[in-house]
Image: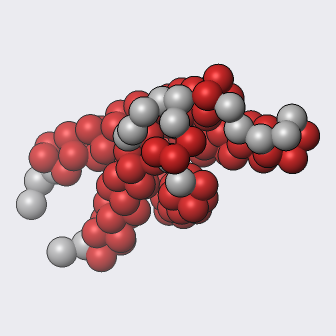
């Protein structure tokens, strides 16, 4: 068993599940989406990105690209949340929809990353 692959796979899948946990719920409801879960999704996505930096293969490049997309979208969601709270006076359903939509894009990137990772794992020889 390759410990590096186990750790990398753990963080890739954890990033996806945390992102899904934030994304799931009524798109307009502030109560359905936790700022702490968004923060955890960002941190775990950044860790997964760092773990993908050392892979010099073509698949590693694609995995890194999907991870960077997820990072950018989740960070953008956090920036929108912060700006909404501190400059416009609070969250409203329209702003929450933007935040959740950005998280949905990151979720799609994470799903792509997990699918590629599982496909590579199934393709690899023992």
Question: From the viewer's perspective, is residue 49 above or below residue 87?
Answer: below
Question: From the viewer's perspective, is residue 39 above or below residue 64?
Answer: below
Residue at image position (11%, 53%) is 125
Task: Judge whether residue 83 can be spotted in this image.
Answer: no
- Most foreground residue, 77 or 123: 77
Residue at image position (53%, 29%) is 28
Q: Where does the image place residue 115, in percent across and percent down from the top left?
A: 26, 38
Q: Please, which residue is most extreme toward the right here? A: 87
Question: Does residue 80 appear to the left or right of 87 in the view shown?
Answer: left
- Most foreground residue, 96 or 73: 96
Residue at image position (18%, 74%) is 1
Q: Where does the image place residue 75, in percent across and percent down from the top left?
A: 68, 45
Question: Does residue 65 appear to the left or right of 21 in the view shown?
Answer: right
Callout count: 0
Q: How is the image coloured?
A: secondary structure
Residue at image position (35%, 34%) is 112
Q: Please, which residue is most extreme toward the top here? A: 94
Quadrant location of the C terminus in the rendered image: bottom left
Which of the 4 image quarters holds residue 26? top left
Question: From the viewer's perspective, is residue 98 above or below residue 53?
Answer: above
Question: From the viewer's perspective, is residue 20 above or below residue 50?
Answer: above
Q: Where does the image place residue 11, in percent across and percent down from the top left?
A: 40, 62
Task: Judge whether residue 118 can be spotted in this image.
Answer: yes
Q: Where does the image place residue 90, in percent across and percent down from the top left?
A: 77, 41
């Amino acid at each position: 068993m390759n410990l590096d692959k186990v750790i990398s796979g753990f963080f890739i899948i954890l990033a996806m599940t945390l992102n899904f946990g934030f994304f799931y719920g009524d798109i307009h409801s502030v109560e359905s989406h936790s700022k702490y879960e968004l923060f955890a999704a960002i941190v775990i996505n950044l860790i997964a990105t760092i773990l993908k930096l050392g892979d010099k293969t073509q698949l590693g490049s694609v995995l890194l690209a999907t991870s960077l997309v997820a990072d950018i979208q989740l960070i953008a969601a956090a920036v929108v949340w912060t700006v909404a709270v501190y400059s416009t006076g609070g969250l409203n359903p329209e702003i929450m929809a933007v935040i959740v939509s950005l998280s949905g894009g990151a979720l799609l990137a994470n799903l792509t990353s997990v699918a590629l990772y599982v496909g590579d794992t199934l393709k690899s020889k023992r």
